[in-house]
Amino acid sequence: MPMPPFSVSHCVTGFDASRLRPWGCRLYGFSETLPGTVQRLEVAQPLVKLVIGLASPYGLAANGREERCQAFLVSRPAAPMLVEQRGAHACIEVELPPWAAYRLFQGDGQVLASPWLDLRELWGAEVSLLVEALEESPCWTRRLQRVEGFLAERLQHSRRDVPEMLRRAWEALQRSGGCAPIHQLSQQAGCSGRHFASRFKAHLGQGPKACARHIRFARAQQLLESAPALELVQAAALCGYSDQSHFTREFQAFAGCSPGAYARGGWADIPGKPGSLLKGQEN
């Protein structure tokens, strides 16, 4: 297993972003010093994530596409991606549900359909000014407050919103770990199955079945993170998969490696999973 030399990592959690609370957003700060270049595996997730880098840009790679970005949005890709980092770097990460992302980006369909997008292409020079202001401030609380205000302004003044019944359906899927019956959700929304699926995809970027798959996988991935020694057949049953084979196929699709390899993989002294898992170098 590849293991880089000693590094220092720090995570800022517990920030109360009260202005973003109505939209279910969470903010985190990260800083890290790496002795060299590291490629991390980032698996597909049901939430939309904004990453605002404060030092060197990140290298992003997935499905033959490569790009370097200082600040970017990661939607809900159907496949894993590699994120390359090097040296000393810091960032602020924002997690938000897809219905909040729809409002934040004014209903722009490409946002929820793309694996990642450079925030400068979406918001222009304002992103560069935000990054400069964050780099000039050494205080993490002030940094997080500045990002909170930046996003709150956009959310409050947006003219686009997801219908309440779709928001409730997404939240029901999230609470159930992706196991809520889709036909029940459509009935509760007062729609036919086809109409419900069409509206769900139009506003949230993917249909309810695809969304359920993302959420179910995220639950399985978090379970393997917290209990790597758990038998795979047990993990499959706990997360609502029909059998271990189904679990393995879905995990391979979203993570690019088997659940067993994912559970065993990792570095000794830095968080995350090595990109070599996706490249098939892990045993």
Image (cartoon, helix red, strand yellow):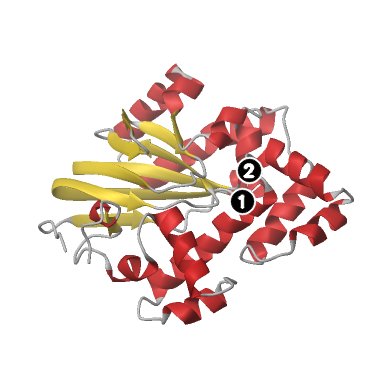
Q: What residue is disc 1 on?
A: 210
Query: Which quadrant, please, contains the C terminus?
Result: bottom left
Could you give the CA–CA distance between mark 2 and mark 1, rounded to whole angstroms? Answer: 6 Å
Say left or right for 131 vs 197: left
The answer to whether mark 2 and mark 1 are in CB contact below 8 A is: yes
Amino acid type, label 1? Ala
Residue at coordinates 50% horizontally, 23% vertically from top-left?
122
Q: Residue at x 19, y 64 (%)?
A: 269
Residue 128 position within the rendered picture, expressed as x and y whole percent measured from the top left: 38, 23
Check the image and name the residue furthest to the front.
Answer: 245
Label 2 residue SS: loop
Could you say which quadrant of the image residue 182 lies in? bottom right
Query: Looking at the image, can residue 99 be seen?
Result: yes
Tag 2 residue:
206
Name the foreground residue: 174 vs 132: 174
Front-most of residues 55 and 109 = 109
Along the viewing direction, whichever of 91 and 142 lies nearer the viewer: 91
Within-10-Å neighbours for mark 2: few <14, some 14–19, many 20+: some
Q: Is disc 1 surrounded by few (<14), some (14 to 19) or many (20+) residues within 10 Å?
A: some
Residue at image point 44% right, 67% down: 248
Q: Which quadrant does the N terminus fall into?
A: bottom left
Q: Secondary structure at mark 1?
A: helix
Please provide percent x and percent y for residue 228: 36, 76
Residue 139 visible within the image: no
Reply above or below: 260 against 53: below
Return the x and y of residue 264 as percentages of the image width and height. Answer: 28, 71
